[in-house]
Amino acid sequence: MIRVTMQDVPVVLVHGWKSHPGIWNRLVLRLRDEGIPFWNFDQTPLNGASVEEIAAALQAGISKTRREREYFGEIDIICHSMGTCIARYMLEVLDGTTRHERVRQLIGIGPPNKGSALAELFNHPVYGMEIITQLSGVFVPQGYNPAEDLIVQQFRPDSSTMTTLASAGIRSDISYRIICAANLLGTPGFFPIFLGKTWEGSPASGWRQTYAGDGIVPHSDSILPGVALDILPRDPSVLEYNADEYCHIKLPRNPEVIERIIEYLKNH
């Protein structure tokens, strides 16, 4: 049996929508190098489940692993994209009043904390099909139909799920970290499908494209009250030769993102 010592804080890894635990392969190597224990939450068997169901499964998985490893102390949770809101739903809604989950910090990479402008655009009567076609085979599967995707419907900013999450509020006993990328040089190769830009906006305010995003999630979607955005790269010149390494899809494997995560874990 593996026991975690008191000085260790295990990490729970939560991948995003239509993704898989393999996105953490480079981070896992660094965690092993640093001697940081990790638990990988695989939500791929939950295809078609709701945010509420996946959040409950995450909670049950953490509880099961705690019992197996006989560890009941604090944990850190690292999430990519929509996985951040899954973890937040677990912490802020399911556990928001009882606060049984002992979590030191929640680190979200490119999270749509306020809901996803792109999820809303997928359903747009004019722009939706064009954007889906552009992203087919890259971010969505061929023949993708958003009307049949419960998660995408729940991540529309005005959905009841996102409204419930916003109403719950963030927890004062948890440190929240938000890591975002930005196309600081306006390089088209950052996310070529959208010429280096990211869609943002709403039906009420209108739609526009911005360099303040990672190609999929704009900074305006990532904002949480009172939480600063940690925007990468630190050195914009790196975008001159590897700009696409900072797009949303590649962020979990990005070396600078990984090093920033390790900084948070070791210097909380």
Image: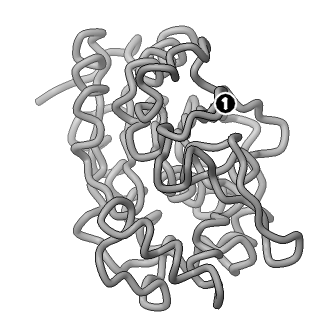
Q: Residue at x 58, y 48 (%)?
A: 111
Considering every residue shown, the one lying at the far left of the view is: 1
Q: What x and y, as percent, mark residue 88?
A: 59, 53
114 relative position to 70: left or right:
right
Instruction: Give the residue drawn at x 32%, y 18%.
Output: 36
Q: Looking at this view, is 195 or 232 the one in front?
A: 195
Q: Position of residue 237 (x, y in %)?
A: 56, 13
| Quadrant showing the C terminus | top right
The residue lying toward the viewer, choosing from 227 and 194, is: 194
Q: Is residue 182 visible?
A: no
Above or below: residue 211 compared with residue 122: above
Q: Residues within 10 Å of mark 1 (few under 14, many from 20)?
A: some
The residue under label 1 is: 175
SS type, badge 1: strand
The N terminus is located in which quarter? top left
Kind of residue at badge 1: Ser
